[in-house]
Image (tube, rainbow, N blue to C red):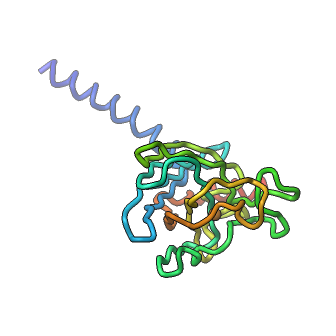
């Protein structure tokens, strides 16, 4: 008897301690499932909103070893028949900005630092960007036509226009919302704009 009461009590503590952080941590999230030009699966990009920017976790495979440019492009359209040009140019917030971390008048909001594939073609990385958001404001990548994340064949030189001489688009994933921003948070963001 005593034992079952104790179990119930422990169960309640466990439940409440679990529920509270889960609710508090309901930040927007998104996911892109990446595919190559041949349609083969090439892994995922996970987007997690934080108070300091959007964390992007890359878990990729099937790449050539070495450096690759990775950018967020403006349209959520990964049509293989167009060699992924259907994803459009880089996502930008200010139309007059140029591409590249080292370019005068840079950067595009969709610019991300180069990442490096291992000799087996896998790439595991975690980057953060405060130039984009998963919310509903000005920096949101979720405008009417969505957004895509693209891996290029070569490194981004961070200077050349319009894509840093990074070559072909070898992997593409449409970025899909998995956790939408809560209305209260969206309202709070509006106040701070
Ligand atoms: Cu690009």
Q: Quadrant of residue 20?
A: top left
Up/down of 82 relative to 10, above or below: below
Q: Is residue 2 left or right of residue 103?
A: left
Q: Quadrant of residue 167?
A: bottom right
Query: Is residue 169 or residue 1 the one in the foreground?
Result: 169
Position of residue 102 measured from the top left corner of the image (x, y, whole percent): 81, 50
The quadrant of the image that shows the C terminus is bottom right
Position of residue 127 measured from the top left corner of the image (x, y, whole percent): 60, 44
Position of residue 145 measured from the top left corner of the image (x, y, whole percent): 60, 76
Q: Is residue 82 left or right of residue 13?
A: right
Up/down of 103 relative to 168, above or below: above
* Residue shown at 49% from the left, 63% from the top: 171
Query: Is residue 108 or residue 159 the one in the foreground?
Result: 159
The residue positioned farthest toward the right in the image shown: 104
Query: Is residue 110 or residue 188 the one in the foreground?
Result: 110
Q: Is residue 101 left or right of residue 36?
A: right
* Residue shown at 16% from the left, 25% from the top: 4
If the picture is divided into quarters, which one holds ligand 1?
Answer: bottom right
Position of residue 52 measured from the top left corner of the image (x, y, whole percent): 67, 43
The residue positioned farthest toward the bottom in the image shown: 81
Up/down of 87 relative to 27, above or below: below
Number of numbered markers: 0
The quadrant of the image that shows the N terminus is top left
Query: Is residue 5 or residue 71 the one in the foreground?
Result: 71
């Amino acid at each position: 008897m005593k034992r079952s009461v104790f179990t119930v009590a422990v169960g309640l503590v466990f439940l409440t301690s679990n529920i509270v952080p889960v609710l508090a941590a309901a930040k927007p999230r998104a996911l892109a499932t990446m595919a190559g030009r041949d349609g083969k699966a090439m892994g995922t990009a996970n987007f997690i909103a934080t108070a300091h920017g959007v964390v992007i976790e890359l878990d990729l495979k099937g790449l050539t070893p070495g450096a690759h440019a990775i950018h967020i492009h403006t349209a959520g359209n990964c049509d293989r028949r167009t060699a992924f040009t259907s994803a459009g140019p880089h996502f930008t917030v200010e139309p007059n900005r140029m591409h590249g971390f080292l370019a005068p008048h840079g950067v595009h909001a969709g610019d991300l630092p180069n990442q490096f594939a291992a000799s087996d073609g896998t790439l595991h990385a975690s980057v953060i960007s405060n130039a984009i958001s998963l919310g509903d404001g000005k920096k949101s990548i979720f405008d009417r036509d969505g957004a895509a994340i693209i891996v290029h064949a070569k490194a981004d030189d961070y200077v050349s226009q319009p894509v840093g001489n990074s070559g072909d688009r070898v992997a593409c994933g449409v970025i899909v919302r998995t956790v939408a921003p809560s209305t209260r948070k969206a309202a709070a963001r509006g106040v701070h704009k």
